[in-house]
Amino acid sequence: MANFPFIEILVVFAIYLAISYFYLNKKLGIKIKRRGLLSMHRKRYFLAIDFLFISLFFGVLTGYANGDFTFMGLHSYIIAMFGLFIMLSINSGIEEWIFHRKDKAFYHEWLSTLLYLLVLFVLYSSEK
């Protein structure tokens, strides 16, 4: 824990917020449309895909906790957690892109996917 990359993660979040708020929101006028996981406005098949990702995530965690996945190390928790966030964000972005393309809110979802990838890269590269 002594080598936790706190400053690097703050820089990544600051860049994300600058792009999201100042460029996408203020300059281009693209508003964030957050829909929850159990929102009434979600399509059923995208909701089913989200639950599939969540169940796969819990399957990996219970397999790791039971000792079935002994080949997996500490990095597997980080990769599984960020993999879940990345897949949920990509799925939500694709749903926005298909059904609400004129709103252009999918740019925020895909920007958050890039945020998760960058934070995963920072965390993974700091562990040695």
Image (tube, helix red, strand yellow):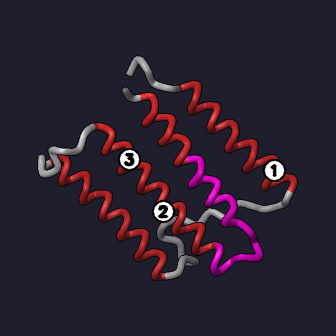
Q: Which residue is mark 3?
A: 79
117 is higher (above) or lower (below) than 40: above
In magenta stretch: residue 77: no
Determine the CA span between mark 2 and mark 1: 24 Å
Where disc 1 sits, the SS reads helix
Residue stretch in magenta: 97-115
Name the mark on residue 77: none
Amino acid on which disc 3 is placed: Ile
**Are circles 1 and 3 on residues that touch, CB within 8 Å?**
no
Residue occupying the far left of the picture = 67
Determine the CA span between mark 1 and mark 3: 29 Å
98 is higher (above) or lower (below) than 30: below
Q: Which residue is mark 1?
A: 23
Does the magenta stretch mainly form a helix, a strand or a loop? helix
Q: Nearer the viewer, residue 78 or 47?
A: 78
Locate residue 80 relative to residue 10 in the image: left or right.
Answer: left
Q: Quadrant of the N terminus?
A: top left
Locate residue 25 relative to residue 106 in the image: left or right.
Answer: right
Determine the CA span between mark 3 and mark 2: 14 Å
Q: Earlier in the sequence, mark 2 or mark 1?
A: 1
The spot of residue 81 in percent (x, y) is 39, 49
Where disc 3 sits, the SS reads helix
Q: Residue at x 31, y 65 (%)?
A: 55
The spot of residue 7 in percent (x, y) is 58, 25
Q: Which residue is mark 2?
A: 88
In magenta stretch: residue 112: yes
Locate residue 57 relative to residue 91 in the image: left or right.
Answer: left
Where disc 2 sits, the SS reads helix
Residue occupying the far top of the picture = 2
Q: Residue at x 41, y 17 (%)?
A: 2
Q: Earlier in the sequence, mark 1 or mark 3?
A: 1
Q: Residue at x 46, y 81 (%)?
A: 45
